[in-house]
Structures are given as structure tokens and as C-alpha cells.
Image: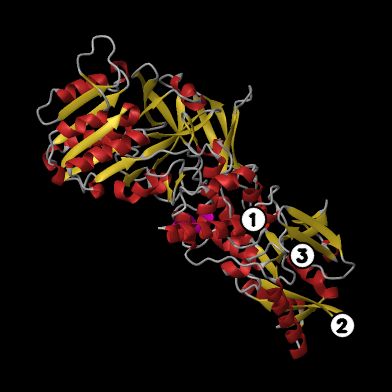
Amino acid sequence: MEVLERAELDGLLNELKRRGYRLIGPRAERGAIVYDPVETSDDFPAGWQDEHQRGVYRIQNSGGNALFDHAAGARALKHFLIPPRRLLWRAHGGDSDFTVETPRSTPPHFAFIGVRACELHALALQDRIFIHGPQPDPEYKARREQAFIVAVNCHRPSGNCFCASVGSGPAVTAGYDILLTEVVDAGRHYFTVAAGTVRGQEVVEVLGLRSAEAGEEAVAEAVLQEAETALTRQLDLSGLREVLLGAADSSHWESVAHKCMACANCTMTCPTCFCATVEDTTPLGSGTAERWRVWDSCFTTDFSYIHGGAVRKTGASRYRQWLTHKFASWEDQFGTLGCVGCGRCITWCPAGIDIVEELDALRRKRQQKLQAV
Amino acid sequence: MYAPQLEPMAPRLYRIQRVRRETEDTFTLEIAQAGGAVPTRFAPGQFNMLYAFGVGEVAISISGNPGTPETLVHTTRAVGVVTNAMSHLKPGQVLGVRGPYGTSWPIREAEGNDVVIVTGGIGLAPLRPLIYHVLEHRERYGKVVLLYGTRTPEDILYRREIEQWRGRFDLEVLITVDRATGHWRGQVGVVTKLISRAPFDPYNTTAFVCGPEIMMNYAVEGLQKRGVPSDHVFVSMERNMKCAIGLCGHCQFGPTFICKDGPVFQYDKVERLLAVREI
């Protein structure tokens, strides 16, 4: 393990830029911490901390120096790897003849800085869908395979985080090129550094960092411990699948639907939600038609539309679809849970619906029902 | 059978060879790949994504003969923006095609058994390739029964063809309509009523069912009452579909993706799902 002083952080960023990467990292802007392009380490949200509650998000500056003092922001990495709108192809001609061109340029080389454990788990889940399935998504695959990951261990989980319950955090264990642990301690500000891949190792070697001393490693270890202690929210996963599959006709969905506005915020901010629709543009005289891939949400009525109307007409059926997908059918489809415990859907729900509470409530109702029998 | 594509969302160009009006609101397009008759091999029950230039794309089952894959045949109802645009296309004009996609009717596994087809309205379209296959390899199957129901006599699809099938000694065709109009002298009532008197050996039968979900549920009930085991019944499902390659999430039906795990399912595998409303 090596040590990277705060003052040397730009050395790392510059080396990544020199290798042709576009840097994406957290920034405090317009009242939120989001992944966006960054140039130097001064762009990182120094001192900014975030507060998450049900339906509440605030950031405030603590006046401290820590750059990564926040939990997951609203924007997940899917924003860059499988963007909200993407041109799939363009067709020229008309009903009598047309040609199709797929404007695939060289995929952007992203280096993501400050990636959390939950985010890495989300990437692994999306990889299972977009790379390891029977039909890969060529654009996702190209972007993902190029992406360089500088993970930073979480040291200040939010009140909505429950990553430990679903086994995705808070400590980063896999999926990174370089892993940093940020330490602000006794007037010093540094990162411990571990490489996870050959190319990560190459970058670290170029930086010529010194080895970490035992004391520094111990402090970094304590930071991880602190995060684990701070993570108090828990989701009971035992038998959850059976709870959900047995709750298909539960009245509980109706009670959630009373609160749910079907705004789709949960699905937009969720780092694993992958649903999309296509939009076909109609040429007006130009003879050029386009098809775009656009993020979609199972909370819209249109989502399940077939001739004659939507299959999921009620809010209750749509909420049931989402939650059952995340915690039961995802397992059938992709062999894992569909949730990484980042808490985004709780934070960004304008009605303050909390999936942990809803799942617990479904479990209680099932137990009551079983006892009544 | 599906091989991953480099550009899975890009359609291939097909030219319309023939347009046939079937009923008042349904039509059939016969298409062939532009620039040479490259056969598009498909299995009965599979579907294609058809694109009308500048309008959009829809999933439509293949209803032609799998033995003549040089021509793709699609029957659909003009019901939305895309299918309405398609209904105005003329021979010589073009469509975009992606596919074929999805699972197929188990024609091999059904060999040696009686074949019972229960369908309603346009549900006959995805079953016609199966009928063609069975008739072409008639010796491989036992009794073959087609039970077909429509709203009115005017809604009977492929009417001339059905009349020919009815003239065969090796095929039993029973037709019923919900509402008798004109000079209809045939059966009136729901298609599921035909099951009880259809001639087949329930213990050695493979049944193929396609129609509205409610009709399929009743059809399966009728088949089960006759003694056909659930794992010998196959149904074809439908959901909204945008990509047809398992990546858009729209066609989820419980844990399944209709586009790749379906549209054809062994009934006992989806029985639990069919009982859930709005799933």
C-alpha cells in the first residue's frame, strides 16, 4: 500500500489525463453533489457534506478539507455509461427505400474518480445485463471496458444507506483500478493507495509514491471501521423473496400507491435500473429518421402499454413491479439482488417512501397472515 | 438459435411483395430481404420487430410457412400509429426488420402426439406457421384439431385457407363466433366451449394456445378438465416491447422477459403469473 499526499492528487489526475481519459468526479453544484467532468482536484467538493433523509437532501460546507465527505449523489454512473438519451441510428430515405447508419464514434474514455462501493456493485450488476447477457449492448460494453475506476472508500455513509445489508459496502473490495482511502487526521490530509488491476498498478508506479507506514495504514483502517459503525440502517433479506412473491395480491401495495406519485425519481436515480424506451423521430421533409434510446421507468402508464391499454394501470401494480423486480425477479433474471443499498430512491422520493420500511411492512403483514392461518 | 448482433437495434431492409386485406382491420404483408432473397429462417411462434420508416417499430409474430423462409409473412391489426402506417404500404415499398426473436412452439417434442390448437381472433397468426409445419409433416403427428373463435364471422382470419383445411380428412377444424351476423349457420359461443367435444386423446396431446389472457386461462382450464397435463400446454404471451433483446425491460412478465424467455411458454411455468392481475 502506498501513500498519496493531498498535494499529489493532481499528479494522479494529470497522469490519467495524459493517458487520454476524460475525468468524471464529484462536484458540488446547484445544491447537490453530482458526478460531472472535473479538471483538477480543486473541482472536488472540499468540505461539503450531505444530509439524507426520506425525501430530503441538503448539502452544507463543514469548512473541513476532506474531498470525499459525502454519500451517493443523485447521479449514478449509468448517466455516463448508458446515457439518458443516445442516438441508436439514423435512416435516410423513405417508404420506398432507406439506408441505416449507426453513428458509432470511438467510445469516450472515462476515468471515474471517487467511486463508492455501492456504485461499483451497481456497475457489476449492469455488466451482467449489458455485457454478459445473450445480447450485449455494444455502446455500454465499449464505454465500460474503457472506463478507468479510481474508487474512494466511503467514510461518511448517509442516513439512508444500507449497503452492508445487501453486501455491497461500505468498504470497496473489488472492481477498481485504483482504490483510495481518504484520511484527514492530525493536520495531515492524504490517501492510502491500492492498485486493483495491471493498468492501475502502472499508473501508481508512474506516480512514484512512497510506501505507507504502519501508522498510516492503521488510521486508514480506522476510517473504514468508522464508516461501518456509522452505517446503522439494516434491511432484513432473509426470506425476502418469498415475502414478495407471496405478496402479489397484498393490500399493502395499495397503501404505498396512496403515497407514490409515480414520478419515476426512484428509477431515474437508481444505479441499477436499466429500463429504456425508444423514440423514433419523424422526418419533416428531410428524409432522415432517427431512433433514440431514452431512459424509461416502470412507473409510467405507457411503459406497459399494449393495444387496448396499459397492463399495469394502477399505481399499486407499478410499485409492486418495481419492488418485486429489485428484490425477487432480478435474482431469477441475473442471479443477484437488483439493489445495492445506496439509498438514492429513499432520498429522492418526493413522498419520502422508504423501501426498507416498505419491505419490512410487507414482511410483517406476511407474518401476521401466516399466524392467522 | 439467437446469435448476438454487432448492431442489435439496426433494422435490415425488406421489400413488400404482396399486401393482403384479411378482415376489416387486419392485413398481411409478404416481404423479402431487399437486394436478393436471403432466407430468414425462423421457427413457428417467433416474432420480428417491424419498422415503418419515420414512424416506429412494433413486435409482430411471423405467420408464414417456415418451409419457405425466402418470404416473411406478417399478419397484424391496424391498431396503433405504426400498424396504421404499415397498413398503407404498397408492394415495392420497404420495411425495416429485426429478428427473428423469441422461443417457438415445441414442434419436435409434440411429434407422436395429438395436436390441439386453441385460438381466438388474430391469435391464429402466430399459430399458422405451426399448422403449416404440422400439415407438411403430417405423418409425424396424431390427430390434429384447430379450435378457432372470433367475434363475428367477418373476423375470421385466413378464411379461404381455413375452408381448405376444413376440407381435409386429416384435420379437424371447429369454428365458433361470439356473435352470429349475416348468414352464419355455424357454432355460436366462446372457443373454450369447443374443447369438451373436440376429438383428441388428452393423455397424448400437446396443446397450443394463443389469444387474450382471459381466453387462454379458460382454454387451459378446459384442456385440464379433459385431462391434458399442464406441461403439455403451451401459450404465447404478449407485452409491450421496445428492444426484443432483453435490454429495455418493457416486456417483463414476472421474472421472465417475453422477448427472450417467451413469447411461447410451457403453461405450468407461467401458471402462477397468469393468476396475478396487472403483472
Say the numbered circle drawn on residue A186: 2
Image location of residue A217, percent across then percent down: 73, 85
Identify the secondary structure beneath mark 2: loop
Magenta span: A325-334
Distance (Cα) linking label 3 and label 1 = 20 Å
Q: Which residue is mark 1?
A: A354
Q: Which residue is mark 3?
A: A70
In the rendered structure, the answer to whether residue B135 lies left or right of residue B40 reads left
Q: Earlier in the sequence, mark 1 or mark 2?
A: 2
At 25% across and 49% down in the image, what residue appears?
A: B231
> Disc 3 vs disc 2: Cβ atoms closer than 8 Å?
no
Mark 2 falls within which chain?
Answer: A
Residue lying at the far front of the rendered structure: A372
Q: Amino acid at mark 1?
A: Asp
Distance (Cα) linking label 1 and label 2 = 38 Å
User: From the viewer's perspective, is residue A63 above or below residue A372?
Assistant: below
